[in-house]
Image: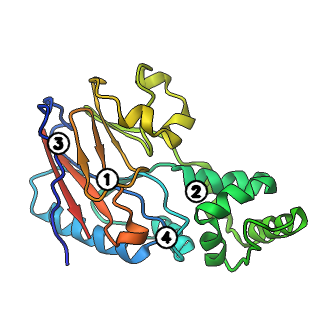
């Protein structure tokens, strides 16, 4: 069953920020290997767009397509192979895609990745890992098998993911931005990884930052940011923000 969720923080007024005229944007939170939820939410997006008076339709996927869920490979294949007619699609890099890239380059990076859902991703590619207590030789074996199992199209997809997208007065990133730093001067590491310094900051950035990365029970709607990571891999709630003109809404599986 689908339902609309409203998580607006009413302690402060919402500035008059807008997406471009005639555009509707759907910003999808962290998928984490839940292909079933992604397909269901995309169908809901298509159905919703039919009822809107928009001349341009955009889906922004906020990263973390992989890890924790056992259909991580299938999620990437779906994003690569499935077109949604009438929609522009933008795929951003999350910190979990960075975990994958780091492991492909350096097997010593495995333990942090394994502890954060990387084992499930490896399994989705048919690679069995020894766990966080594996020896260096074991990690090198896993890396070699993963390199062989990962299709070139997946490698290119991961390597080419941008870290930021903008639509009018809205900036889309995976984790957040560094407060006090101009949007154009942001460090990509912050865009993929930042938490408390951003989440606790209440200043007006001149844009609204739309992000995932940090799990909340319901989507967060504040004057300076919108958070849509509702922990899909565990909660079965994959959420997207729906932005049109100066309106904000949410949909969730």
Question: Label 1 crowding class (10 Å Cα cut-off): few <14, some 14-19, many 20+?
Answer: many
Residue, x 28% and y 57% (percent of image)? Answer: 240
The numbered mark, 2 or 1, whose residue comes first in the sequence reads 2
What residue did someone put label 3 on?
9
Q: Determine whether the residue tagged by mark 4 lies in a helix, strand or loop.
A: loop
Q: Which mark is residue 157?
A: 2
The CA span between labels 4 and 2 is 16 Å
Q: In the depicted view, which residue is nearer to us: 57 or 223?
A: 223
Q: Is residue 76 left or right of residue 230?
A: right
Q: Is residue 72 left or right of residue 39?
A: right
What residue did someone put label 1 on?
228
The numbered mark, 1 or 3, whose residue comes first in the sequence reads 3
The CA span between labels 4 and 3 is 30 Å
The CA span between labels 1 and 4 is 16 Å
The numbered mark, 1 or 4, whose residue comes first in the sequence reads 4
Residue, x 13% and y 35% (percent of image)? Answer: 11
The numbered mark, 4 or 3, whose residue comes first in the sequence reads 3
Percent from the top left, x then y, of residue 55?
17, 50
């Amino acid at each position: 069953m689908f339902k609309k969720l409203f998580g607006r923080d009413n302690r402060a007024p919402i500035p008059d920020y807008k997406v471009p005229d005639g555009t509707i944007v759907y910003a999808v939170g962290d998928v984490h290997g839940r292909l079933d939820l992604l397909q269901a939410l995309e169908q809901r997006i298509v159905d919703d767009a039919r009822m809107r008076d928009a001349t341009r339709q955009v889906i922004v996927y906020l990263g973390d397509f992989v890890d924790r869920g056992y259909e991580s490979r299938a999620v990437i294949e779906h994003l690569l192979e499935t077109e949604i007619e009438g929609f522009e699609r933008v795929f951003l890099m999350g910190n979990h895609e960075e975990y994958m890239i780091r492991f492909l380059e350096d097997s010593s990076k495995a333990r942090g990745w394994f502890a954060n859902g990387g084992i499930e991703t490896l399994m989705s590619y048919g690679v069995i890992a020894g766990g966080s207590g594996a020896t260096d030789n074991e990690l090198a074996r896993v890396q070699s098998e993963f390199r062989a199992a990962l299709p070139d199209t997946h490698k290119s997809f991961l390597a080419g993911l941008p870290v930021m997208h903008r639509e009018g007065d809205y900036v889309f990133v995976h984790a957040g931005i560094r407060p006090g730093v101009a949007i154009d001067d942001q460090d990509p590491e912050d865009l993929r990884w930042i938490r408390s310094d951003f989440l606790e900051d209440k200043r007006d950035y001149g844009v609204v930052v739309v992000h995932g990365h940090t799990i909340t029970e319901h989507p967060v709607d504040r004057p300076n940011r919108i958070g849509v990571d509702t922990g899909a891999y565990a909660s079965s709630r994959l959420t997207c923000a729906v932005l049109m003109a100066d309106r904000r809404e949410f949909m969730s599986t």
